[in-house]
Amino acid sequence: MRGVLEGNPAYREIYIALIDWCAEERALEEAQALCEAGRTSKSQIASGAAMVDTMVRAGALAERVFVSGEPYDGTLEALQADEEVPEDAVVAITVQATEAGRRGAAAVARERSLDRLVQSQPAREEAFRAVLAWCAEGEGLTTRRLQELLKDNDLLETEAARGIDGLHASYFTGSLESVGALAWNGKAWVATEKGLAEV
């Protein structure tokens, strides 16, 4: 389960938010809608249904099936083949985070936090926080504009003797994206909800 969270960075923050939100049992449709609304990038093309299904298959969410308000002892697939269930029966499905799902999401969230990123590179905290603040304004910023701002603010660790920048804006945007604080919207880098909470 942890491998799914770690191995799919495009969806990591959506999956963690889904698991957190499903600490209480939720209707399947609501969980799917949460995933649809959680997209921050055009590269996130999986449907809400596919995202929830991925978390169920990974063991992060448990699915329960109800027939006319009563729990059904089996999967949706089994229900669909069950000839004893009347055709007009009302079927509802819920999902809830498993203990393993909650532990895995909490561990990944701790490891992939802005605090952890800054702790690992304290000399670059000012630059990380500056990029995040700039991308929290308006419609966000392009990598080129961030490069200019970082240079203007002397945050690129420029080698004075040779006049070469030791870092590039993409270093900061990539690092902040990896902890879920920034997202590329197809035109610019923008602060995510998680990133805005840090500004």
Image (tube, rainbow, N blue to C red):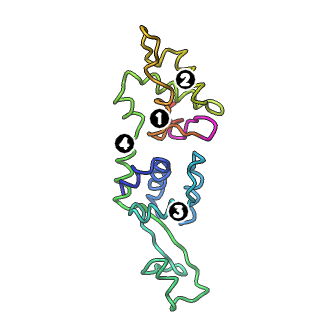
Q: Which residue is mark 3?
A: 50
Q: Describe the element under mark 3 as helix, strand or loop.
A: helix
* Above or below 39: residue 120: above
The Cα–Cα distance between marks 3 and 1, rounded to whole angstroms, is 26 Å
The Cα–Cα distance between marks 2 and 3, rounded to whole angstroms, is 37 Å
Identify the residue at the far top of this view. 161
Amino acid at pointer 1: Leu
Residue drawn at x 58%, y 35% as measured from the top left: 189
Left or right of 172, for residue 118: left
- Give the class, few, some or many, for how many residues have Cα within 10 Å of label 1's Cα (few <14, many ≥20): many
User: CB under 8 Å between callouts 2 and 1?
Assistant: no
Q: Earlier in the sequence, mark 2 or mark 4?
A: 4
- Residue range in magenta is 185-194
The Cα–Cα distance between marks 2 and 4, rounded to whole angstroms, is 29 Å
Q: Which residue is mark 4?
A: 110
Q: Which residue is mark 2?
A: 147
User: CB under 8 Å between callouts 3 and 1?
Assistant: no
